[in-house]
Amino acid sequence: MNRGDFAVKITSLKSILLLMMIVPWLSLPFLGGKSTKRFLPAAIFIALFVTIEDIFAKRRKWWWWYEYIHPKLSGIIPFLWGPFFVGSLWILKLTYGKFTRYIVLNLIVDSFFVYFLVNWLKKLGIASLVRMKKYQLSLLFLLKSLVLYAFQFIKENCIKKSNL
């Protein structure tokens, strides 16, 4: 690969990351303002939770991001503030209050990420698992989905009690 091909590859990877971050936001108008307002605090909370998790994961070398949209930003940023954040809003809108449906949908989405997208990211040279197995990543996603649901549950119960 010559230097020009390398530059094109880097530019196209950055474009893929930017698209992954931007495209999910195009679905937000279909979510509805009321749902966005209702579930936004939980989505922000879980995004911050995952940001801290990523710092810990780097130190433990659970996974590694090879490609960044900016040198000072973690490689997880496009996924975190794109499909993960917007996906959290959608999953809560579609399933909140129906816990079994919530868990099943999360398992489907998370399994798709773990068992298909992780391979694709590795093939593209964007990211890969290092000291974490896929089943461990699946369990970590399950834990995060429980934390997200618990946050929303507590938020809604506190708001109901404070309005009485």
Image: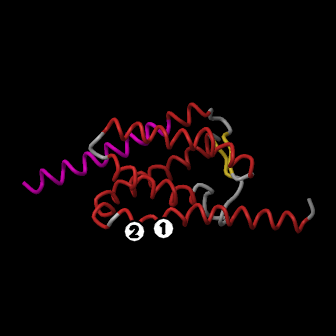
Location of residue 147 in the rendering, given as x and y in whole percent from the top left corner = 37, 42
Of helix, strand and loop, which one carries label 2? helix
Of helix, strand and loop, which one carries label 1? helix
From the viewer's perspective, is 91 left or right of 158? right
From the viewer's perspective, is 148 left or right of 133? left
- Locate residue 115: give its quadrant: top right
Locate the N terminus and report the quarter of the image it occupies.
Answer: bottom right
**Residue 157 shown in magenta:** yes
Whether tag 1 and tag 2 are in contact, CB under 8 A, the answer is yes
- Dominant secondary structure, magenta: helix
Q: Which residue is mark 1?
A: 26
Query: What colour scheme does the image use?
Result: secondary structure
Query: What residue appears at the point 33 percent right and 62 percent down from the top-left corner?
Result: 36
Decide which of 33, 151 is in the foreground and name it.
33
Going by the numbered disc 2, the residue's amino acid type is Pro
What residue span does the magenta drawing correspond to?
Answer: 140-164
**Residue 153 shown in magenta:** yes
Q: Which residue is mark 2?
A: 29
Going by the numbered disc 1, the residue's amino acid type is Leu
Location of residue 102 in the rendering, given as x and y in whole percent from the top left corner = 36, 41
10 Å neighbourhood of mark 1: few (<14), some, or many (≥20)?
Answer: few
How far is mark 1 from mark 2, CA to CA? Answer: 7 Å
- Judged from this view, the residue extending furthest toward the front is 30
- Locate residue 40: give its quadrant: bottom left
Q: Give the answer, above or below, for where 60 lies relative to 125.
A: above
Location of residue 27 in the rendering, given as x and y in whole percent from the top left corner = 45, 64
Query: What residue appears at the point 50 percent right and 33 percent down from the top-left corner?
Result: 139
10 Å neighbourhood of mark 2: few (<14), some, or many (≥20)?
Answer: few
